[in-house]
Amino acid sequence: MKRIKLSHGSGGKLTHDLIAGTIRRYFDSPLLENLPDSASVDLHGCRAAFTTDSYVVDPVFFSGGDIGKLAVYGTVNDLAVSGSLPRFISCGLILETGFPQSELDKILFSMSEAAEAAGVDVVTGDTKVLPPGKVDKIYINTSGIGLYPKEASVPDGEICSGDKVLVTGPVGDHGAAVMACREGLNMESNVQSDCAPVTESARIILENSARVSFMRDVTRGGLATVLNEAVADKDVGIILQESGVPVRDGVRSISELLGIDPYYLACEGRIAAVVDAGHSGKVIEKLSGSISGGESVIIGEVSEKYAGKLVAETAFGTHRLLQMLSGEQLPRIC
Amino acid sequence: MSFEYLDNYRNPAQVAELGRKINDLAGGLDRRIRLMEVCGGHTMAIHRFGLPSLLPANIELISGPGCPVCVTPPQYIDAAIEWGRESGGILTSFGDLYRVPGSEMSLEDAAALGLDVRIVYSPLDALRIAEQEAGEEVLFLGVGFETTAPTVAATLEIASQKPGALFRVMSAHKTMPRALRALVGVEEVSIDGFILPGHVSTIIGTGPYDFLADEFDVACCVTGFEPVDILNGILSLTEQCCKTSFFVDNQYGRAVRETGNEKAKKLMMRVFETCAGNWRGIGCIEGSGLEIRDSWADYRVPGPDPHDQTAGDPKCRCGEVLRGVLKPPECPLFAKGCHPEKPVGPCMVSSEGACAAYYKYQKLSD
């Protein structure tokens, strides 16, 4: 009998296989076709983005954030990168018997602060409590609705040779922060999660370029996984300049120690986007004056070479393939 | 961690210069030389930094048996799962071992069927679980070379101070020099030089490899894992081949001494004694394994008989890959029936496995 394994939840290839091969067989709405992070739905003439996500991060409190903050920003960011303005979210709590009320208060306070910062209202919710051991402390599900501004442009999905690839800040902070806080590693580290809303950066990217061909928030699976999705089944590829990809020293330390490539470490407040070359300079300039995108840089280019592949050019001029995350284990990062 | 230090070993100008020197030297050789990187960490680093494209056509790098997970035989996984089922205890393991296929299933498959398998980052974490889950037996799967064995030994010494913790170890630990002796004698492999394992050598030193140069006329160099380290190692091996003068060079002086780490060696031998070791792909090598001594018998869960050579999946050719006879892409299953997410053999599972390295950093056709 086939059974679900831990790797089915990795966000990598096996997760995609599970969605495409099993889950999708039962749901055939045309809106699911490209499996976007949020669906673009028509509500009697008003176009809205709709998304959902569950949060099971371990530990619940980590450097730079907690499960509550993550649950708000994670859903907000899925809405924002679709080009919509996040408006409403839900709050579904699944709690373990014995979970301290004071910690729940801390998490809810953090959610309320995050919702205010992101400009969304928590408008509905649900609570379930399970016996000890049937759930690990607390899980949160949030769903969200965002509204598309009138006449607004949205990412078109057609990346072209010559387009520039940008990221709105150093990568891997969230993954490294959670790993460092995890029981068992006991690492001294000053790395903080980058957990933050990306709504402002997404607006700047959309409003200052002629064409945004791809825009996603970088989460589980990291930069390499997201950019692999950008080139999948395309007749162009992406070449990243490895020395240009920003990675904080603390994140590099943890990556070196654990033998993990920082390009596969999760972020929770970064966008990776592909924009037309002509406007890329202006986009970076505008982003650098923003709060959420102050450390934005161009990290690579779309190329006719390497169709369908993501390739890193090393500091030595050699090229190496960056595949979609497969087989590696970083469970419960978000 | 200071990156100035690390960046010195990744300096592009120095990498280019070493590449030139190696090309010049190898140009004077009228033959092809085959260099084996013994350690899986080297295999990964070589491909991660794209080093093969800097080397001349007559230097061939082949991967060796230095990935501890890869050389762990399927019988060991079977024995661990069986222990879990019979005792009802908790299995703890490094993540790399989690998805390695046994004869019937992996630890991951067994966990999906209800076995309590937990991934740890160090044997001390496993001991901590044993303290927290007092009354439950906790088995640590001891897989690794001389690099890992001293940590396991230290953990057992700490465990002996904690009577409440029911901590156990099933040892599949192995030692490197005897395996190299077994490999160097095999004609089908024909190795001109060894890039010797950096981490293992920090413990055992360079002395135990002398026989390779003295008895077998093979070039040897211990080196680190950064591009400059690896290229310095390859340069040294190429020089030794050119001059037909062989010795054990040490290009990893910042970590490796000739005599190794005496304290770690003593600690290791207080807890372990040598025994026969079963290497997947190579077979049983006398004196190449480490078993827990009788004086520590309370903590010991015996592993499978190392002389049991029943094979795993007959289509899997990891054995030939581990001996350097076959390159990963030459295996008919490579990237077809065997992927990192659905591995047939251990070399595709472990983060240091040769097949995983070749798969992850597949050659790019323009």
Image: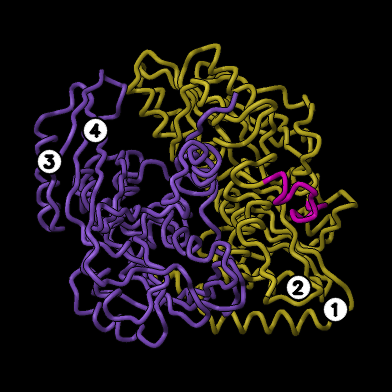
Chain colours: A purple, B yellow
Q: Earlier in the sequence, mark 1 or mark 2?
A: 1
* Residue B335 can be seen, yes or no: yes
Mark 2 lies on residue? B238
Asked which secondary structure carries label 2, the reply is helix
Q: Are marks 2 and 4 on the same chain?
A: no
- The residue mark sitting in front, 4 or 1, is 4
What is the x, y in percent for residue B10? 51, 74
| Relative horizontal placement of residue A95, taking residue B127 as reference (left or right) | left
Mark 3 lies on residue? A108
Q: Local crowd at mark 3 within 10 Å, few (<14), some, or many (≥20)?
A: some
Which mark is on residue B104?
none
Asked which secondary structure carries label 3, the reply is helix
Which mark is on residue A138?
4
Q: Please state the extent of the stretch shown in magenta in the rendering.
A: B324-338
Mark 1 lies on residue? B29
Residue drawn at x 21%, y 25% is A128
| Relative horizontal placement of residue B2, taking residue B80 as reference (left or right) | left
Q: Are marks 4 and 3 on the same chain?
A: yes
Going by the numbered disc 1, the residue's amino acid type is Leu
- In the rendered image, which quarter is residue B137 located in? top left
Answer whether labels 4 and 3 touch (C-beta < 8 Å).
Answer: no
- The residue mark sitting in front, 2 or 4, is 4
- The residue mark sitting in front, 3 or 2, is 3
| Quadrant in which the N terminus of chain B is drawn | bottom left
Q: Are marks 3 and 2 on the same chain?
A: no
Distance between the alpha carbons at the discs numbered 1 and 2 = 9 Å
Distance between the alpha carbons at the discs numbered 4 and 1 = 65 Å
Q: Main secondary structure of the magenta part?
A: loop
